[in-house]
Image (spheres, rainbow, N blue to C red):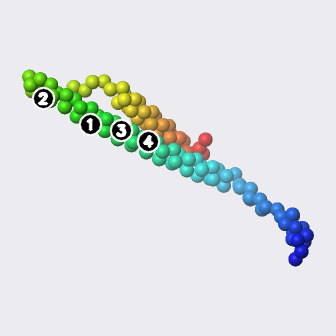
Amino acid sequence: MSASRLEAKTVGIVTPRKPVLSVSARKIKDNAADWHNLILKWETLNDAGFTTANNIANLKISLLNKDKIELESSSPASKENEGKVYVEYNEELEKLCEELQATLDGLMRCLASSRRCTGRSCS
């Protein structure tokens, strides 16, 4: 085959069109895509929530240990207060708790969206 003849065949190539979906098939496809996106969002928020909760727990443990060490290193008269550990306000802990609340709010929105998808088509 010559190059000009091959060129003539490739110029006229038309990519096949996707078949037009019926209305019900389109709704099913859109609903499946909505569920897929909701699941991805849920997994992302869930992972973020567990990470934040883990950070809160680790921070709380380190604060309790710090307070315990401070009580032990203070005057011997403080032995009466040995069982009492006073935790002062911590900005980092507050920030992490707000972050966890925001994650929970996102999960609740995701749940509300999934409930809308079960009754009728998602939007």
Question: Percent x, y for residue 25?
Answer: 66, 55
Q: Which mark is residue 55?
A: 3
Question: Closer to the N terminus: mark 3 or mark 4?
Answer: 4
Q: CA distance from mark 3 to mark 2?
A: 27 Å
Upstream in sequence: badge 1 or badge 4: 4
Q: Compute the Cα span from label 3 to label 1.
A: 10 Å
Image x and y of residue 92, in percent: 37, 29
Residue 98 at x, y percent in the picture:
41, 30
Q: Which mark is residue 61?
A: 1
Measuring from the top left, give residue 20's x and y in whole percent.
Answer: 74, 56
Q: Amino acid at mark 1?
A: Ile
| Mark 4 crowd level (few <14, some 14–19, many ≥20, 10 Å Cα) | some
Q: Secondary structure at mark 2?
A: loop
Q: Which residue is mark 4?
A: 48
Q: Tag 2 or tag 4, which sits nearer the N-term?
A: 4
Residue 82: mark: 2
Q: Amino acid at mark 4?
A: Ala
